[in-house]
Image (spheres, rainbow, N blue to C red):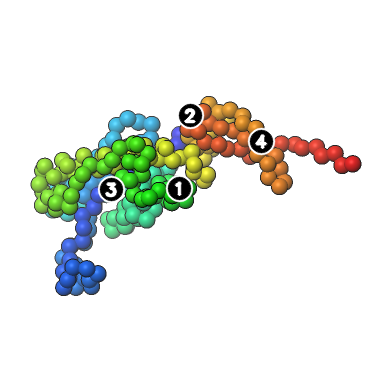
Amino acid sequence: MKTKILVFDIETSPNLSYTWGKYKQYVIEFEQEWNMLCFAYKWLGEKKIHSKALPDYKTYKKDRSDDKELVSDLWKLFDEASVIVAHNGDRFDIRRANTKFLQHGLDSPSSFLSIDTLKVARKYFNFNSNRLNDIAKTLGIGEKDDVNFKVWLGCMNGVKKDWKTMIKYNKKDVKLLEEVYLELRKWISNHPNRALIDGKKSACPTCGSESITRQGFKYTRVGKYQQWKCKDCGSWFQSRRAEKVILEVK
């Protein structure tokens, strides 16, 4: 089995509701709850970034908020993935997707592991800001397209040029996300074990590369372990079994 890592990002519409004011308001009534507008994705290792949006489906002409077919296509990707990468994915993107899966009567997809780059940034670093755009700029990767809320409103009202802007924006997010993930992954101590999933006996557990070198030993209170470093992703790891150590007691 080959590890299939899905890098993805969703865009949703806002909730439409009535309030008596502007800040920290009690919502009197919902006019329309949020729906999924589009998603962009790529499989790690492939060049092309794909996207799906509501106008891609025939149902869009009758109901611009009908996201059932769009959500079903996202479900298929989740079901196929071994690992899913998203920024704030555990709290937002994945949970939002799950909500829509449930709403549209879909079963839970097959099990997958998640890598949330927001959690990685918070755990291992101290960036001034943990937003994807700010991390990407700090690392010299690039930055998101400058898009304002009018684009979301335009998409909700069926404006074609705004849909083009939205899809381009969504795909750019996935490009930045992948590059940020690749920069951060060597720091992730609990990264899903790709060597195990791929069935490789001597490979990097982080990226699956077989280009690894011995780098001395790691010592614990009870054992000595061979230490390794991956030439491709830069990750450090150790052998699972301890070296045999003979102690001479005088």
Measured as percent of width and height from the top left, residue 107 is found at 35, 53
Look at 66% across and 35% down and name the residue there: 217
Decide: few, some or many residues near mark 1? Use Cα within 10 Å; few <14, some 14-19, many ≥20.
few
Above or below — where is 62 with respect to 27?
A: above
Measured as percent of width and height from the top left, residue 119 is found at 43, 51
Looking at marks 1 and 3 on the same chain, the residue that comes earlier in the sequence is marked by 3
Looking at marks 1 and 2 on the same chain, the residue that comes earlier in the sequence is marked by 1
**Closer to the observer: label 4 or label 1?**
1
Q: Are marks 4 and 1 in contact (CB under 8 Å)?
A: no
Label 3 and label 2: CA atoms lie apart by 30 Å
Judge by depth and name the residue closer to the eye, 145 or 64: 145
**Closer to the observer: label 3 or label 2?**
2
Residue extending farthest top: 211
Residue wearing tag 1: 125
Label 1 and label 2: CA atoms lie apart by 22 Å
**Closer to the observer: label 3 or label 4?**
4
Residue wearing tag 4: 217
> Which amino acid type is marked by label 2?
Asp
Look at 56% across and 32% down and name the residue there: 229
Residue wearing tag 2: 232
Judge by depth and name the residue closer to the eye, 76 or 5: 5
Q: Secondary structure at mark 1?
A: loop
Decide: few, some or many residues near mark 2? Use Cα within 10 Å; few <14, some 14-19, many ≥20.
some
Q: Quadrant of the C terminus?
A: top right
Measured as percent of width and height from the top left, residue 51 is found at 25, 40
Q: Secondary structure at mark 3?
A: strand
